[in-house]
Image: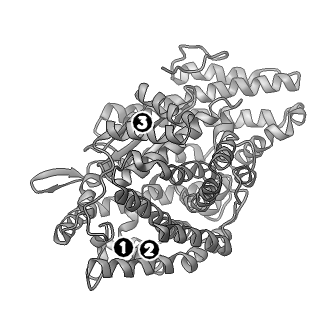
């Protein structure tokens, strides 16, 4: 069993209420600091408080997403969002000022604290008192998306299924059944399209106001600063989109033509895109959540004993909720528990191959959480998404050599690897579409719903529109963006998947050439947390932080070659 780290500054039985927290913030703010050593201790004490608060919030979020029907769990989450978080913000800003204005700040180890201090200075630049109530409202409003999505289900053959469970039918070989299920899932999503449009319009308006208050023309430019994107610009993102359109889309278009011939259909429709073109039934790598967890522990152990032990610890401590059910929020995540030093994995398994890849993806995040658990400051563990997603997406590929624990049959194993590598390429256009769409949304803040529909189609089509024919399905196509949780809940967190996907391919290439060295470089990079620049972390992993057209082409050709070997 694992336990929270022993507290040395805050009370062991601290109650997460503002009345108990405020005196601690006041002590930190009023404390006299007489040396660089005392400043470091002050940082460690603030870090201990921050970790305790983060873990309390984590559990409120986890429990709420595990059961979106519980009013009690929702209220506990909202209490934190409305009664604690807004009151912390002004204190955090004052503590940041105390740090940067301290006469001892220049005596701190520059190498150790450079990244952290850079982030603190940026937070000070962006802070506006008038944004606190707006950010509280955004926090509460965006959670409504999960309640709406979590309530969605469909009936198939007189049985009720969540949308994740129903999507399994889209892998079946009966085309008419696939169409029937796809139409039911789509019709169910469209039932809430107006409600979701209204919710998003409200979020967009609130976010735009936050940006204006902070002195920015639009929310896109504000978020590039808020996310700490020190290493690239919006123009770099547009260039990355172009590289994906030029180098990846033609490969996927060629694969779509092969799919059409293999399925012997005149036109590929959206319900034809997930079925295996071999004509064989959908892959079934495990049977139920417990089996998925056990097999994943074995898979990770076969890569490296340390990795398997991390998942074993999580199982023993009840840190998984993996099966899909009605009333559970959509999607999947790995949530770090800052004091415990372990994470919680949440997902919606429906016994599909995609669930296997979700598990190893979140497992990569989990390993990252364990590797950074003992870093000196809690903020050192707050990695940018470009690094966090490198951890998870690399694990998807590294783990493939040990997928025989999920598949007894050699042909099924090869099919699984082919599907995974095809998905690696398919990820990139969708990332480009979602990212470019968000650039458009927030640089056109007064757009209408109709403008948004048209912009989505205009952006989606050049990237292949899923490589299916949407004739007669225009309403479904133009509302596709609503199924992407990130657009509602974590705006602009998406291009990182594309950048990390390239990095993951490069990590895997190194691993294939020299497994021991490749794995060690990957683990060494993750151990750094966010104590180095993104570029330095990628270099530690033995790869480049590069998303130029030439690099996209080089790595796409490598993946294409590996697919052909299978």
Q: Residue 478's mark?
A: 1
Residue at the spot 29% in from the left edge and 49% down from the top edge: 350
Q: Residue 163's mark?
A: none
Can see residue 25?
yes
Assess whether mark 2 and mark 1 are in contact (beta carbons under 8 angstroms).
yes
Can see residue 78?
no
Assess whether mark 1 and mark 3 are in contact (beta carbons under 8 angstroms).
no
How far is mark 3 from mark 2, CA to CA? 32 Å
The secondary element bearing badge 2 is classed as helix
- In the image, residue 126 lies at what x, y percent? 69, 50
Residue at the spot 43% in from the left edge and 32% down from the top edge: 60
Neighbour tally class for label 2: few under 14, some 14-19, many 20 plus, Cα within 10 Å: many
Q: Residue 62's mark?
A: 3
The secondary element bearing badge 3 is classed as helix
How was the colour assigned to the protein in this rendering? one colour
Task: Compare residues 84 and 513 and report the one nearer the observer.
Answer: 513
Closer to the camera: disc 3 or disc 2?
A: 3
Q: Which residue is mark 2?
A: 456
- In the image, residue 345 lies at what x, y percent? 44, 39
Mark 1 or mark 2, earlier in chain: 2
């Amino acid at each position: 069993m694992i336990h929270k780290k022993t507290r040395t500054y805050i009370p062991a039985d601290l109650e997460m209420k503002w009345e108990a927290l405020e005196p601690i913030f006041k002590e930190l703010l009023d404390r006299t600091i007489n040396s660089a050593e005392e400043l470091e201790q002050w940082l460690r004490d603030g870090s201990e408080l921050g970790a305790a608060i983060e873990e309390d919030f984590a559990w409120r979020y986890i429990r709420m997403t595990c059961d979106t029907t519980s009013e009690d769990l929702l209220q506990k989450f909202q209490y934190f969002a409305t009664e604690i978080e807004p009151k912390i913000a002004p204190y955090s800003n004052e503590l940041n000022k105390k740090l940067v204005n301290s006469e001892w700040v220049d005596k701190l180890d520059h190498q150790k604290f450079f990244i952290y201090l850079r982030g603190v200075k940026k937070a000070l630049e962006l802070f506006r008192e008038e944004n606190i109530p707006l950010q509280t409202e955004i926090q509460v409003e965006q959670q409504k998306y999960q309640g709406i999505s979590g309530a969605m289900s469909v009936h198939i053959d007189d049985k009720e299924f969540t949308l994740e469970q129903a999507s399994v039918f889209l892998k079946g070989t009966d085309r008419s059944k696939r169409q029937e299920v796809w139409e039911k899932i789509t019709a169910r999503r469209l039932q809430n399209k107006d409600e979701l449009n209204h919710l998003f319009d409200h979020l967009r308006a609130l976010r735009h106001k936050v940006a204006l208050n902070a002195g920015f023309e639009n929310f896109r430019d504000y978020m590039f600063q808020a996310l700490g994107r020190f290493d690239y610009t919006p123009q770099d993102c547009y260039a990355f989109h172009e590289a994906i359109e030029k180098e990846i889309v033609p490969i996927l278009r060629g694969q779509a033509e092969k799919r059409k011939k293999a399925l012997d259909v005149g036109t590929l429709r959206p319900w034809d895109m997930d079925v295996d073109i071999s004509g064989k039934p959908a892959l079934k790598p495990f049977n139920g959540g417990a089996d998925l967890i056990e097999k994943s522990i074995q898979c990770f152990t076969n890569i490296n004993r340390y990795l398997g032990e991390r998942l074993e610890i999580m199982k023993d401590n009840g840190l998984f909720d993996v099966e899909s059910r009605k009333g559970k929020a959509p999607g999947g995540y790995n949530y770090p528990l800052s004091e415990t030093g372990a994470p919680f994995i949440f997902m919606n398994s429906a016994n599909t191959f995609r669930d296997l890849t979700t598990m190893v993806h979140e497992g990569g995040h989990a390993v990252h959480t364990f590797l950074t658990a003992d870093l000196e400051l809690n903020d050192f563990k707050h990695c940018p998404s470009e690094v966090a997603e490198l951890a998870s997406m690399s694990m998807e590929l590294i783990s493939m050599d040990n997928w025989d624990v999920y598949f007894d049959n050699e042909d099924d194993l090869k099919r699984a690897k082919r599907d995974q590598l095809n998905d690696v390429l398919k990820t990139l256009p969708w990332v480009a579409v979602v990212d470019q769409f968000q650039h458009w949304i927030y640089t056109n803040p007064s757009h209408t719903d109709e403008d948004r529909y048209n912009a989505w189609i205009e952006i989606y089509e050049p990237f292949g529109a899923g490589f299916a024919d949407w004739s007669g399905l225009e309403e479904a196509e133009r509302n596709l963006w609503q199924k992407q949780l990130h657009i509602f809940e974590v705006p602009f967190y998406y291009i990182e998947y594309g950048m990390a996907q390239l990095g993951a391919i490069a990590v895997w290439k190194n691993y294939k050439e020299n497994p021991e060295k490749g794995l060690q470089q990957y683990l060494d990079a993750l151990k750094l947390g966010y104590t180095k620049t993104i570029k330095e972390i990628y270099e530690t992993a033995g790869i480049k932080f590069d998303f130029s057209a030439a690099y996209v082409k080089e790595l796409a050709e490598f993946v294409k070659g590996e697919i052909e070997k299978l």
